[in-house]
Image: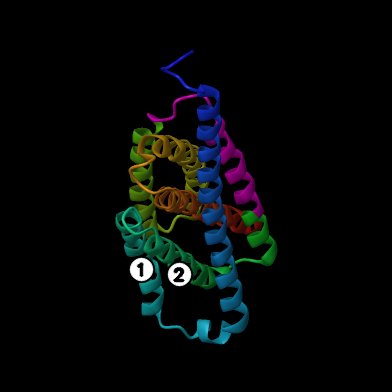
Amino acid sequence: MDNFSPNPERKHVQDISAVNSFLTKMYSLMVLAVLVSAATAYITTTLFSNALATMPQAVYWIVVIVPIFLCLGISFKAAANPGLGFVLLMILSVVYGFEFSFIAGAFTSAQIGGAFVSAAAIFAAMALFGTFTKRDLTNWGSYLGAATIGFLVAWLVNLFLHSAAVTYIFSFIGVIIFTLWIAYDAHSAKRIYSSYNGQVSDSSLAIMGALNLYLDFINIFMFLLQIFGMSSDR
């Protein structure tokens, strides 16, 4: 009789089941956020197109800035209050959907659809890789963080230069960077769940993981949309 390890096989099965339940919840929240954004953009562009055309420029800047505070709110509040974290995530999805409605007019339906399908395919592939790879992707975080900061600085500089060629090249670089972020965030979510399981609720961890993956998807979609649009122009 083994007094030190009673029924270890059953415990292992329970651990796998708990991780799978967490991942299902996290990816479901992420997909829901994407669908809410898509639905908001569609409703806004079809039912409120006239109001959108006459919208003051100040409203656009408010829509651009608000997501920053919503992301911070989710990051700080989700751990203590998962219900509030979920509400903030849905509000963020609506705000981004509204922001997309401003942008949609500059692209055709084919370009938007192609960018969305491509982003979904990239996301699915990298999320699977990040979730199931046996490699340790922990050290990716510091490199990706540095690459993202440098990329954003260069992108802001190019806003003043207005170089179409640089914008086109940067769009490909942006896709690469956030594609790698998907694998890292998917891998990190599983690792963080294992580390904080029991200390923080599954729902809180799932919301924070869904937020990271949602932002990765949105960034890839926007850069792909830029590529599809500029490729057509060329």
Q: Does 193 sit above or below residue 4?
A: below
What residue do we see at 51% from left, 55% from top? Answer: 218
Say what secondary structure mark 1 lies in: helix
Q: Which residue is mark 1?
A: 66
Q: Which residue is mark 2?
A: 95
Which picture quadrant has residue 68? Answer: bottom left
The residue carrying pointer 1 sits among few (fewer than 14), some (14 to 19) or many (20 or more) residues within 10 Å by Cα, namely few
Which picture quadrant has residue 16? Answer: top right
Three-letter amino acid code of the residue under disc 1: Val
Measured as percent of width and height from the top left, residue 199 is found at 33, 43
Q: Does 84 sit above or below residue 143?
A: below
Q: Nearer the viewer, residue 173 or 25?
A: 25
What residue do we see at 34% from left, 59% from top? Answer: 81
Q: Quadrant of the C terminus?
A: bottom right
Horizontal side of residue 176 vs 193, given as left or right: right
Three-letter amino acid code of the residue under disc 2: Val
Which contiguous range is marked in magenta? 117-139
Measured as percent of width and height from the top left, residue 208 is found at 41, 51
